[in-house]
Amino acid sequence: MKYPLLGAALMIAAPAFAQDAVAPTMGPSPTVAEQTAPRPHRAPGITTDNAVEAAMAANAYCAALPKNYRTTTLVADSAGVPIALISFDNAAAITQRIAMGKVQLVLKYKMKSIDAVAKAKADPAFAAELAADPQIVAARPGGIPILSHGRIVGALAVSGTPDGHDDECAEAGLKKIADRISLGLAK
Amino acid sequence: MRKFLLATASLLLAAPASFAQPANPAPTIAPAPGPDEMKLPRPARARGIPTALAIEAAVEANRVCLGNTYKTTAEITDSAGVPVVVISNDGAAAITQRIAMSKIQAVLKYRMTSGEVADKAKTDAALAAEIKADPLIETARQGAIPVMAGPEMVGVFAVSGAPGGDKDEVCARAGLAKIQSRVQ
């Protein structure tokens, strides 16, 4: 019942992140209550080494395309907590939050975000549901699940190509580490 | 100006509640941009260090901390506070990512290490109140240092996750030392 109010407040608040005066990308400093709460271990996910390697490979793939895209790649665990956020030289700041939106979509709907784009076009109710979630807002291609033995253990998302190459770069990044995490079919 | 104040006020109200929600949490990273924001110009990043150097320094900082059994997050931003890399080591708590950013904000705002900000706040009540009122800092904590290229601050480097900001700062300094000669 509190949700609509919170959602409304959050939607008003979101543009504040675009201002130079506030922290771009990251959420606010934890409150005292949050700091004193238990700090559980990360949810299941891939190792930090693998996450860094996949993110670097995705950015490098995008940078090597003819238009030399400058992207951000985010690798998160199965609860959506970032393991590695790597923003390539001269990537736009907004790509970091766009990438997180894709990660949230992948984990919530357990599908590639490019498939969600197609689904949202054909299904107005689904599109409306995405729009109503401030962490997702819209289906944007470039987010893919990371599977290990058929189980989703995280998500990888790329943002920064304005003409539709994010998904390709994400797949290239994940492919780099696929043999190490027993990649299943990412569908 | 007024719009900005309103937005800031809304942020204060919205932030703690929304981040505490278990249903669809967005830990660490702010909400996805809406359609209006997507249409805004996207300027290139502010002055900062190359991504490759940032990765090297962050990995080194986490490695040094892990050598002391601390599982940390290392974060390096450009000179405007936009992350270049956030790397959370295996077993690091999620909250360390936002704590690292709060240390970075303290360095950017006060142009000194976050440990120096924390020290100063101990004897300066006005500064302590100002920090508490800033939702991006809230508490001054040691563990973030400026990344300097000569006299110019080109970024900020923070570590969080060790049991004590002094221990975090040791790892940040070790990470920076690895790349300092190549920072221009």
Image: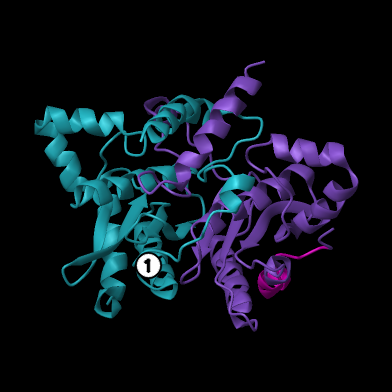
Chain colours: A purple, B cyan
Give percent across and percent down for residue B10: 46, 27
Q: Is residue B163 above or below residue B50?
A: above
**Residue shown at 61%/82% (left/top)?**
A64
**Nearer to me, A186 or A163:** A163
Query: In the image, what residue type sits under mark 1?
Result: Glu
Left/right placement of residue B121 relative to residue A1 reads left
Left/right placement of residue B136 relative to residue A45 reads left
**Residue shown at 58%/40% (left/top)?**
B26
In the image as oriented, which residue stretches furthest toward the left?
Answer: B123
Which subunit holds the residue at mark 1? B
Q: Quadrant of the N terminus of chain B?
A: top left
**Residue shown at 70%/52% (left/top)?**
A153
Left/right placement of residue A16 relative to residue A163 reads left
Give percent across and percent down for residue A99: 61, 55
- Identify the main secondary structure in magenta: helix
Residue A152 is covered by the magenta coloring? no
Q: Is residue A179 at all visible to an observer of this figure?
A: yes
How crowded pointer 1 is (Cα within 10 Å; few <14, some 14-19, many 20+) is rated as many
Give percent across and percent down for residue A126: 83, 40
Residue A179 is covered by the magenta coloring? yes
What's drawn in magenta, residue-wise? A171-184
Q: Dot 1 lies on which element?
A: helix
